[in-house]
Amino acid sequence: MVEEDHNLFAAGNCYDAFQFKDYQLFCPFAYRLLNDSAHIMVKDLSVEYMYLDQDSEFFYVPKLKAKNKL
């Protein structure tokens, strides 16, 4: 997405536990540097951030709200 659309500066896709191949967690995140729109950086957010913790506002909390609506 980031590579094709220059209006996007970042995009990510986090998976639930063991939902991507053999990874316990996997959350690829691609972003452009502020002063360099030609290069795209990519990192796995799950290495530094446990997004399944109850304090995770961008993954756990929405997942819990969706589960409650089902």
Image: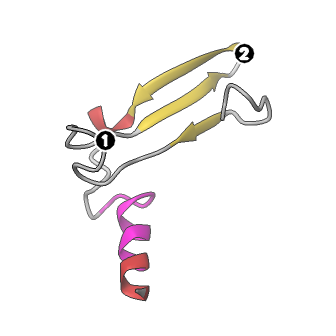
| Residue 33, percent from left and from top | 63, 20
Residue where numbered disc 2 is placed: 35
Tag 1 residue: 49
* Image quarter of residue 48: top left
The residue type indicated by label 1 comes to Tyr
Left or right: where 29 falls relative to 11: left
Q: Position of residue 26 (x, y in %)?
A: 32, 39
Magenta segment: 55-65
Marks 1 and 2 in Cβ contact (< 8 Å): no
Q: Is residue 9 shown left or right of residue 12?
A: right
Q: Is residue 35 above or below residue 49?
A: above
Seen at 76% across and 32% down, the residue is: 5
Taking depth in this image into account, of 52 and 70 the one nearest to the observer is: 70
Residue 64 among magenta residues: yes
| 9 or 69, nearer to the observer | 69
What is the spatial separation of the Cα atoms under label 1 and label 2, in whole angstroms? Answer: 25 Å
